[in-house]
Amino acid sequence: MKYLLVLLVVVIAVGIWRSNRRRAEQVQRPAAQRETRLQPPQDMVACARCGLHLPRSDALALGGPAQPTYYCCAEHRAQGPA
């Protein structure tokens, strides 16, 4: 019975120590690491010259808003479609 009581005290002590350690790690980490939220998916387009897929926000567009042609860089935009 004495050993059971000692084991119980040790288990409780280890549990408290681990929970305090986790709490301390969370406080030390910057807020950006604690809250890693995924950004919404972006529309992907293909370069008309080489076929490289890249996000629409990074692509260079040529043409009207109804039917734009997308390029990955200014050099490919100058060369035109393949």
Image: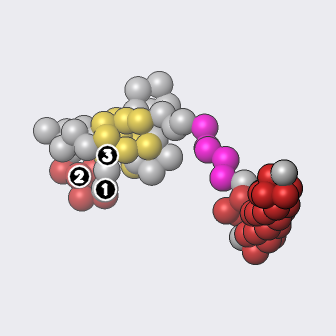
Q: What residue is shown with label 1?
A: 73
Q: Residue at x 25, y 43 (%)?
A: 52
- Region of the chain picked out in magenta, as a range: 36-40
Residue extending farthest to the front is 1
Residue 9's disc is none
Looking at the image, tell me whether mark 3 or mark 2 is earlier in sequence order: 3
Tell me the distance, in whole angstroms, between the alpha carbons under discs 3 and 2.
Answer: 6 Å
Asked if the residue under mark 1 is in contact with the one under mark 2, i.e. CB atoms within 8 Å, the reply is yes
Main SS of the magenta part reads loop
Q: Is residue 57 left or right of residue 73?
A: right
Amino acid on which disc 3 is placed: Tyr
Q: What residue is shown with label 3?
A: 71
Q: Is residue 31 highlighted in magenta?
A: no
Quarter in which the C terminus is drawn: top left
Name the image quarter holding residue 46. top left
Name the image quarter holding residue 49. top left
Q: Residue 21's x, y, as percent?
A: 76, 68
Q: Residue 39's x, y, as percent?
A: 61, 44
